[in-house]
Amino acid sequence: ERMHALLAALGSPHLAVPTVVVAGTNGKGSTSAMLAGLLHTAGVRVGHFTSPHLVETRERFRLGDRCVSAERLDAALVQIRDAAVDIDPTPFEVMAAAGFLIFRDEGAELAVMEVGLGGRLDATNVTDPLVAVVTQIARDHTRVLGDSLAAIAREKVAIARPGRPLIVAQPSVTIGAARRLGLDCPVRKVGTDLVISEASVSGKGFGTSAVFSGPALAEPLHVEVALHGVHQLENAATAVLAYAELQRVWDRALQPLVEVAWSLAEVPWPGRMEVVSTQPMIVLDGAHNA
């Protein structure tokens, strides 16, 4: 209710730009970054809202392959401060509202919004997303979301909308949660609609590659992923499935996946198994749960 009130005071920027919303415990930042990268390569003016930031707050707001300027973010925050009289939004609500505002005013054609916590009551869950994405589910924020995977999944899958595609990386628990909520939406699954094979991690730079195939794809894709680790192949597959569904449901024409999948090898996402030195080997990783 608070987020709706704030956005209404700002002229409802969340309704001006189509969205994809990405929830999950692990991998939602990497998945949303790779989806935004695919869309940028396809020529879409894409906004990407994520959290947290590593160095500067403005890293949470990207247009194409660049963070917004500090001046642009400051201007949005001033607008929100002036509109938020008597609303008292939380810091994350302010950040999400700034994302919607910046993406509208900067002419984004589509916004990829990463959920902050959970999904059902998150500040990003105020739109009618073209596609909803739920990555891996694990136990996190159990005091808020519940102490079982089923309860946590119910909170996260609530970003889905009836009749709109839902992309899932962990089908059993996520689809079960969707059914318990009575969500009637087409589901696309990693492992069924898109199958990962020939996965490989090699070299001191942890080069990661695989073949993606399955009924969701017109032809097999040989992909290389800039982000390190076999787990990132699942995140890349989730992003590819989301792109494939956007091709089907969005009224904007998108390039074939075979013409844009190469960009997965160039998507940067610092702090995720990031190799900063090989002599000696030094890896930075921001994982905060098992």
Image (cartoon, rainbow, N blue to C red):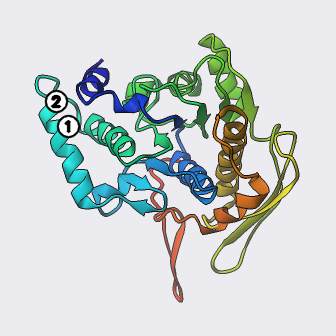
Q: Residues within 10 Å of mark 1 (few under 14, many from 20)?
A: many
Which element carries disc 1, helix, strand or loop?
A: helix
Where residue 108 appears, x then y in whole percent? 45, 46
**Image position of 64 with respect to 246: above or below:** below
Q: Is residue 275 left or right of residue 89?
A: right
Above/below status of 288 relative to 172? below
Q: Nearer the viewer, residue 261 or 182?
A: 261
Q: Quadrant of residue 117?
A: top left
In the picture of the structure, the residue carrying the numbered disc 2 is 84
Query: Quarter of the image holding residue 180?
Result: top right
Whether 10 is drawn above or below 235: the answer is above
Total numbered labels placed on residues in the image: 2
In this view, 160 is above or below 97 = above
Q: Is residue 83 left or right of residue 121?
A: left
Residue 122: horizontal and vertical position, in percent? 39, 29
Q: Secondary structure at mark 2?
A: loop
Q: Which amino acid, mark 2?
A: Ala
Q: Assess disc 2: are there few (<14), some (14-19) or many (≥20) residues with their C-alpha within 10 Å of its C-alpha.
A: some
Residue at the extreme bottom of the image, as rendered: 279
Residue at position x 86%, y 47% from top? 218
In the picture of the structure, the residue carrying the numbered disc 1 is 80
Residue at image location 59% in from the left, 56% down from the top: 43
Q: Position of residue 113 (x, y in %)?
A: 47, 40
C-alpha separation, residue under disc 1 versus residue under disc 2: 6 Å
The reply to whether dot 1 and dot 2 touch (C-beta < 8 Å) is yes
Amino acid, disc 1: Ile
